[in-house]
Image (spheres, rainbow, N blue to C red):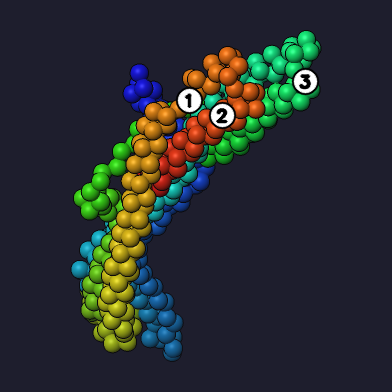
Amino acid sequence: MALGFNLFAQNTIDTVLAEVEKNNTSLSAHRKSIDAERIGNKTGLTPQNPEVEFNYLWGNPSAIGNRTDFSIKQSFDFPTAYSYKNQISNLKNEQAELEYKKQRNEILFQTRVICVKLTYFNAIKIELSKRQANALQVADAYKSKYSAGEVGILEYNKAQVNLLNANKEVENNEIESNALLSELAMLNGGNAINFADSLFSMQTIPADFEQWFTLVEAKNPLLQWVKQEIAISEKQAKLNTAMSLPKFYGGFMSEKVVGQQFQGVTVGITIPIWENKNTVKYAKAKTIATQSIETDAKLQFYNIMKATHIKVVALQNNVTDYRSKLALFSNSALLEKAFIMGEISLTEYMYELSLYYENIQKLLEMEMNFNVAFAELMKF
């Protein structure tokens, strides 16, 4: 039965994540921006526009007649340049998708954390409802006893204050839950989501960090983005080399004067001397710099993941240990019986009961912290 509840909770969170991914306005705007960027990356890959030229020249003296020139020509970069341009375009489009994936992961992480906190407040609400019902029962009983003269004003007031505190804790819990639901609605494009789960899903994390990290590293958008940047720099260096090679142009030309006409093909070549100076050197230097950035990013990512992994494993162990010992040493079932039998006073009963609720709250807080840390670990 517990397994069924846990699976239901997990499926509910997954449903919320799917809704947020579909309705989040930031993701929608980012998606449109990425689509526009993909189109932009596919521009400038073709040869330059053809050039058409027409000249009409008046002769002087007029006896020699007029002259008419017409030409059309097309220039071309060195052939390998177009291949490198297309490869760079594809790499940039893949980078754009990684940017979107990074943004998506961040939004879904925020959503998951809110769901975890809501699960905590929903679980607390159940406990507070029990406490509220118990406080109301005690308050009513002491009101009757006070009216009958069986207890004094101090005991009566103590029972009423206990009920007041229970009511206010329920109200405060409701305020926190509503605030989180508002944040969830904001992430969901302004559409409200009713999230009522009160059981934390049973998350597990592999104890072998190195083996786990190998899988995570391959899926990290940031590291993938840096790898793409290195590949782009390498292709850019090759492109700059190709752009430093001679350019060609060819076309048709016609010249017409009185009684004569000349027409035929025209070809030419540009001599690469000044225009692309240092471009290849710059691209190679940028590649080296990007490789250093990748090394640094990997190191930082490894250290962050290892620290978070250690934290998650420790929290997981704490939750398991605290839950088992709390179930073993809990006196909650005996308290009410002892109070009804008159073995403990109202003060002792309220104190022991407050300790019980405090322990339950600590356990739920530990489970919440564990799930938040686990979500942070899986964000990457």
Residue annotated with mark 3: 152
**Callout 1: 10 Å neighbours few (<14), some, many (20+)?**
some
Q: Who's the residue at 22% across and 63% down the image?
A: 83
| 281 to 186, vertically: above or below | below
Report the disc number at residue 203: none
Residue annotated with mark 2: 352
Contact flag, marks 1 and 2 (Cβ < 8 Å): yes
* First in sequence: mark 3 vs mark 1: 3
* First in sequence: mark 3 vs mark 2: 3
Marks 3/2: CA distance? 22 Å
The three-letter code of the residue at mark 2 reads Glu
Q: Is residue 18 visible?
A: no
Marks 3/1: CA distance? 28 Å
Residue sitting at the far front: 343
Q: Quadrant of residue 56?
A: bottom left
Report the disc number at residue 331: 1
Q: Is residue 328 visible?
A: yes
Q: State the image coordinates of residue 226 (x, y, percent, origin top left).
A: 32, 62
